[in-house]
Amino acid sequence: MQRVKSFLIQVPLWLYFIISVYPLFWMISYSLKDNNEIFVTNPFGLPTQFRYENYINAWTQFNLPQYFMNSVVVSTVATLFIVILALMFSFAIARLRWRFREAVRLYMLVGMFMPLQVIMIPLAILVKDFHLANTYGALIIPYIVIGLPFSSLIFYGFMRDIPSEIEEAACMDGASVYRLFTKIIVPVVVPAIATVVIFQFLNNWNEFMLANILISDESMKTLPLGLLFFQGQYSTDWGGMGAVMTIASLPMVIIYLFFSEQVERAMTMGSAVKG
Amino acid sequence: MDRYLSNKKAILIFLLPALLAYTVVLISPVLQTMYRSFFEWDGLGTAVFNGLDNYKEMFQDPLLMTSLRNGFIFSVVLVVFQIGLGTILALACADPRVKFRKLLKTAYFVPVILSVTVVCQLWIAMYDPTNGLINKLFQIMGISYQQNWLTSPTVSIVAIAFVNAWQFMGYQFSLLYAGVKSIPEQYYEAATIDGCSKWMAHRKVTLPLMKETFKFCFIIAITSGIGAFVQMLIMTNGGPGTSNYTLTFMIYRYAFLENKYGYASAISVLLVAISLVATMIINKVFDRKDD
């Protein structure tokens, strides 16, 4: 009886396991097939003959390396600035003493609840007015700002928990406020920094909506945007399309498999803050 | 000590970069959208004040009803699939008899980290009426429910919403799982001693204690349903016809394809208002059960 029960509990879990993973397995397997095998002879299973040429074609014939490069630059730079600015900001509201810090904290919080769609139009105009259209700045600047509220809140939470004796000690030792920040506070919140880096990098890497509006130049497209236009070019070559999609996904999946615990924690931490 | 930490210059240096960027790039655009919603404006020329005309026009726009309806359907699909099924999976996964828990959790989460474009392209292929996996699967199982998933005006919105539901299931699942796990073991022991079955214990103990988690899950599911956009754009471009429009899709079309920036701003304001009201209602509903 116990066995049956334990089995019954596991059935939905493994069923959903298949629903969750099989589409990805299917994508990878058709990236190694030709059209005939995908459509007629072997639609579901592993490829009978691994056609690596799909990957070579995908990488060499299209702008994939360029998209990759753009995504790396945009995501890395934006994440770096998010971390630096949010650390500084939260230090000012969590540790320094001044009158309006609570008001400023709430002001920053507003950004977390603002649907991004509402800034789409003015942002497009802002980017045009500052002649940033089709530059890295067109994406990096909005991504930094969008990342600030969440990151600041995470850092704020961590910094509040640092005992105030630390500052007293730093003050006694004659360390300046700047040294206190760089040598003591920042090292203490390293775990929070790791969380924020993962979370923001993923967000920036996968962002689509704003990139779609702000970037039209082929050479500046990020990966999510570039992939959109493979659809037309590849409509007759499913294997090639599969290869493109697999290449685009692999780096993130590998990072995730290495840091799955941290990634999930970073993602779910948002809920602790927002809820 | 106070003097040390209220160094005015230091406060400004730490505070200003983030605060300025945030104000210029986020807050001022929000205010601008509100302001511009009262103007007729093509984004380039001078804006002409027209009072509430944009709003009047909006409520007569047949696309509005389509968009609201689709936003609603989208939200319902997300709630049922992610929260309904997700809760069942989270409860099952928390059962001590379940093995390979880490593998299961990882498998559920992988789609979350994929690019939304990849996921949409993948599902376009899966939904393909002749070569797609879904119809082939039905064929093999002898079910005659083959569909033109993305070109049928009735089925497509659900098919598209499902893609979003599928991709972010793992996210909601991990929130729900964390919620289940956060409940102290003693509560169950007490419930069992009182003669509760496992299922009863979940209903009487687990679910009520997960109120905060559920609240957040509902807010995500419903607001992302109302604001849905990317999936429509990639998979059907709002079609067939205009049948898959959502509020964000309307904003996108009027602002960037038809240069009606003032009108699109009014729709943005409505979108924010609806999202806020939905969030407030969810908060109210979940907080009331306290008494």
Image: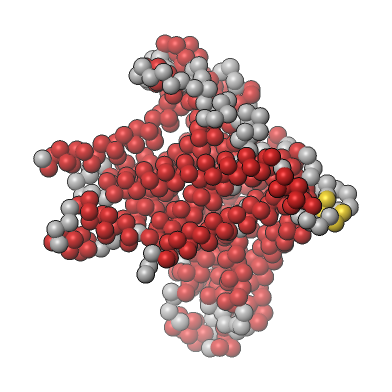
- Seen at 32% across and 44% down, the residue is B89
Query: Hey, which residue is sitting farthest right in the picture?
Result: B46
Residue B170 appears in the rendering: yes
Tell which of B150 and A86 is nearer to you.
B150
User: In which quadrant of the rendered image does the N terminus of chain A lie?
Assistant: top left
- Seen at 56% across and 26% down, the residue is B152
| A34 relative to B30, above or below | above
Q: How many marks?
A: 0
- Seen at 19% across and 46% down, the residue is B97
Spot occupied by residue B234 in the image (x, y as percentages of width and height) = 60, 34
Spot occupied by residue B235 in the image (x, y as percentages of width and height) = 58, 31
Q: Quadrant of residue A217?
A: top right
Task: Name the colouring of the figure.
Answer: secondary structure
Tell which of B88 and B195 is nearer to you.
B195
| For residue A53, side relative to residue A145 (left or right) | left
| For residue A58, side relative to residue B189 (left or right) | right
Residue A249 appears in the rendering: no
Q: Quadrant of residue B51?
A: bottom right
- Seen at 54% across and 45% down, the residue is B72
Spot occupied by residue B108 in the image (x, y as percentages of width and height) = 38, 41
| For residue A12, side relative to residue B3 (left or right) | left
Spot occupied by residue B200 in the image (x, y as percentages of width and height) = 22, 54
